[in-house]
Image (spheres, helix red, strand yellow):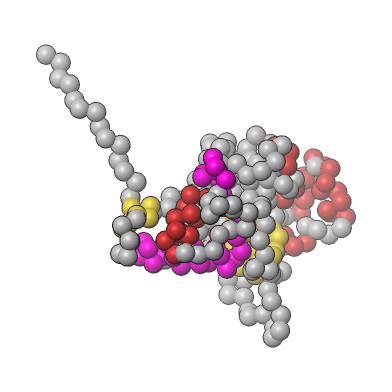
Amino acid sequence: MAMSFPPQKKKPKATVRLMESSAQVPLPEMVVVPAGEFIMGTSDEQIMRLYWKEDWAREWHEDGMFNIEQPQHWVDLPAYEIGKYPVTNEEYYLFIYQSNYKLPKGWIGFRYTEGTQRHPVVGVSMHDAVAYCNWLSKATKREYRLPTEAEWEKACRGVDGRIYPWGEDFDPWRCNTLESGLEGTSAVDVYVPAGVSPMGAVDMCGNVWEWTSSPLLPYPYDPDPPPPARGEQYRYVVRGGAWNYTRKLARCAAREGNIPDYVSPSLGFRIARSLE
């Protein structure tokens, strides 16, 4: 007689219960980036490749706009974890609900737009992103933070210095940029597996810019930058490009900077965590 087995139950996602509430905070999905060196920045050879293949690159080259991504250099990082996806609306909503924190710019009626629960949260400043990390750390008893610029780039491109997470040439089917014509953010897992990085991170190019904890300074990368001069304020690096920007900024090495209290409908963040 053939034996029948009861259907296996799906393994529940790990959760941590808050001490002060009956609500539960799901542990975020993270990917491990192993310790070691990677290539950071854009090389002269890559600029020439873009120059001959991309019409926008000629003006960029002539105006010196690639300079901020140079010189290309090696950076050695300890092991760490980074969010598999950008922080989503539903994740940020739980933070607001539990902490009574202010709403992101653009939310109406104390919630995100219906049907966008898996879209990246936007309209948040760097201060807001740090507040989320602090809340999540307390709720889960694990130390979360914003990634450094170098951690973000290694998670995006791996160790071989590629131009895009998937290789050397742009592909509009692998990320949400202006060329996609979506005219807004998309769910963070839409471009799986086409847009997954070598380290297993998703949605790193296109969809939304992402805050990092690093000030926008000339290369080579400095893991311990000096404090800003008295009376001055750093701009902090944002990475990845976004739905309302063209492909020229959806590159692993492209970098922009914003003041910490800046908010935008195309700017969000993902989290990171050091590994002992």
Q: Quadrant of residue 164?
A: top right
Q: Position of residue 64 (x, y in %)?
A: 83, 59
Classify 117 as above or below 271: above
Q: Residue at x 47, y 64 (%)?
A: 100
Residue at (30%, 40%) from the top-left corner?
11
The answer to if 154 sits in the magenta stretch is no
Q: Is residue 83 above or below residue 8?
A: below
Q: Quadrant of residue 167?
A: top right
Residue at the bottom extreme of this rendering:
230
Quadrant location of the N terminus in the rendered image: top left
Q: How many marks?
A: 0
> Is residue 247 depicted above or below 155 in this figure?
above
Q: Is residue 223 visible?
A: yes
The quarter in which the C terminus is drawn is bottom left
Nearest the viewer among 139 and 97 is 97
Q: Residue visible at 66% across and 53% down?
A: 265
Q: Is residue 10 left or right of residue 251?
A: left
Image coordinates of residue 69 in percent, x first then y, are: 72, 60
* Picture coordinates of residue 238, whole percent (x, y): 65, 60
Q: Give coordinates of residue 34: x percent, y percent.
A: 46, 56
Whether residue 188 appears in this view of the structure is no
In the image, the segment drawn in magenta is 113-141
Decide which of 60, 70 is in the foreground and name it.
60
Q: Please report the residue visible at 60 percent of the width from the left and 41 percent of the height from the top.
A: 186
As for residue 115 lying within the magenta part, the answer is: yes
Question: Which residue lies most toward the left here?
Answer: 1
Q: Is residue 44 left or right of residue 211?
A: right
Residue ranking furthest to the top:
1
